[in-house]
Amino acid sequence: MALYNGTMDIDDESTGPKVTVREAESDRVDFVLSSVDLALANSLRRVMLAEIPTVSIDLVNIHTNNSVLPDEYIAHRLGLIPLNSRDCHKDMLFSRDCDCEGNCDRCSVELELHAKCSTSATETMQVYARDLIVIGNRPNPWVGSPVFKEGDDKGPLIAKLRRGQEINLQCIAKKGIAKEHAKWAPSAAIGFEYDPLNKLRHTSYWYEEDPKNEWPINERNAAWETEEGVNGGMNADLPVGAGGEAGFDPDAKPQTFFFDIESVGILEPDQIVQQGITVLQEKLADVIRGLGGAGADDIMNGGDSPDGYEPAPIGDGGYTNYGANGMGASGGQSAWGGLGGATPYGATPYGGGYGGY
């Protein structure tokens, strides 16, 4: 992603959602989303945090480890190493949706680490993420590779070895989402703000003497709202109060939202935003299908529209912890047996009795 400093409008339509990119770097993007409601903006934020598919080490087979670190420590560190996840949302399957018995090159990436400090070494040997090697086939040429910064970056430190110590292990990286484990999170942080001047009175600040000094506002976002007319004209026509503030409208709603997305490196910031929109469309389409309504395919806005997204088909149980063949398949099976609301307490208005496992 090319470096960018300034503003750029993504959508010039005055009636629809509008995105203005203020800053764009290789690992960060700052943009303003306007002409949408709070529910949509917050849904996009939550999806970008926890529901974008990425790749991370999930299984570790340790053959040799006589370092000072226990096996569990090393396995935990390996799971937190960022791996390239480019196009994994369409090129890889969730392991729960794959028909293989263990793992295959359609649902996983295999990595190997073998490091040994010679008996004649005079210094401690440091093992980094760069020492992980992808072996075998993988869904595309880049997915599963450890992510490094430019230059001589070696990645996170895994362990230190003294003379004669050795680590030999095999890793299986799988596709997942941050709802299952934080290691699959594509973003380090997502800044989200609206109404920086608090003209909607959504926040009541506790203060000792002066709230303006004790709760400083974001000057950049406040200046943006002032230039744009306070959330697209919100409160602009109301009389000014005695303190110089704009009048308060209890029915006003926020329409402008400020996002600041920082990537951990496994996906570029623009890919995080685009895939977040795609996942949100998939979830909405799935709801429409579940309700039996028409137009589920149209909401994806793919194929027929040159500007639409074309996400991978939604598999049975694709975004659940249990998948198609496990407990909760198709959304109907419950932990207590039977379909739907059966409980361990017998028949209820919501189910037909306890069926056991």
Image (spheres, grey):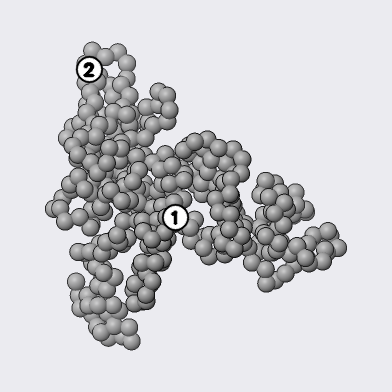
The answer to whether any part of residue 43 appears in the image is yes
| SS type, badge 1 | loop
Q: Nearer the viewer, residue 226 or 356?
A: 226
Which numbered marker is on residue 307?
Answer: 1
Which one is nearer the viewer's eye here, 146 or 291? 291
Which residue lies under the disc numbered 2?
118
Q: Position of residue 205 (x, y in %)?
A: 69, 58
Find residue 241 and report its image quarter.
Answer: bottom right
Q: Residues within 10 Å of mark 1 (few under 14, many from 20)?
A: few
Label 1 is placed on what type of residue?
Asp
Label 1 or label 2, whichever lies nearer to me, is 1
- Please report the residue visible at 41 percent of the width from the left and 59 percent of the height from the top: 305
Quarter residue 38 falls in: bottom right
Q: Is residue 101 left or right of residue 68?
A: left
User: In the rendering, at what x and y percent does residue 39 appear?
Assistant: 53, 65
Residue, far left: 101
- Viewer-closest of 122 and 32: 32
> Dividing the image into 4 quarters, which one contains the C terminus?
bottom left
User: Which residue is painted at 36% across and 59% down in the image?
Assistant: 303
Residue type marked 2: Ser
Residue shown at the point (31%, 47%) measured from the top left: 88
Alpha carbon distance from label 1 to label 2: 57 Å
> Mark 1 or mark 2, which has the lower sequence index?
2
